[in-house]
Amino acid sequence: MLFSEVTSEESYIVTGYESGAVGINQVGYTRSLIVRPNALQQDWPVDTIDALAVEHLQSVIDHPPEVLLIGTGEVQRFPDRVVWRHLRSEGFGVEIMDTAAACRTYNLIMAEGREVAAALIIDGGD
């Protein structure tokens, strides 16, 4: 599903999502990643929400956004309680949703000029 034909050399924009892949500035990625308007972390080692640990989000915690979106794959699922509690105690907003919704929401929040980060789990990433 293509969201936008527009790319930006200054910002990372989600340009598409389909099962097993996400497009960032019209480049396809099949592995989980963290995207912010000014940064793209492609080597994010989380392939399921059950594998998510606090240390996987340390780069976000160290430079907190206004809102962190966690895309949990094809289906919305919540992380382990320890992870969830820790994230909620950090002082920034945290929203958990399926990855397609996280992709759409990321673009909306970014378009508002707000600081946003999206940790996107790509199901079946290679």
Image (cartoon, rainbow, N blue to C red):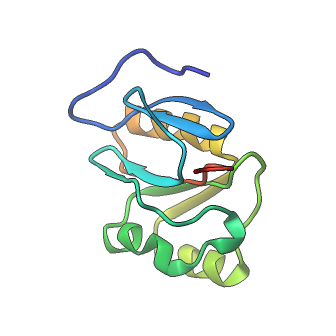
* Residue 1 relative to residue 89: left or right: right
Residue positioned 41% across, 60% down in the render: 43
Residue 120 rendering spot, x and y as whole percentages? 55, 51
Furthest toward the bottom, the residue is 82
Residue positioned 56% across, 61% down in the render: 94
Q: How many labels does the image show?
A: 0
Furthest toward the front, the residue is 126
In this view, 7 is above or below 57: above
Can residue 118 be seen in this snapshot? no
Image quadrant occupied by the N terminus: top right
Residue 119 rendering spot, x and y as whole percentages? 51, 56
* Residue 70 relative to residue 10: left or right: right
Residue 24 rendering spot, x and y as whole percentages? 42, 35
In this view, 47 is above or below 74: below
Residue positioned 46% across, 39% down in the render: 109
* Residue 120 relative to residue 109: left or right: right
Residue positioned 71% across, 71% down in the render: 50
Can residue 5 be seen in this snapshot? yes
* Residue 90 relative to residue 7: left or right: right
Furthest toward the top, the residue is 5
In this view, 88 is above or below 71: below
Residue 125 rendering spot, x and y as whole percentages? 60, 50
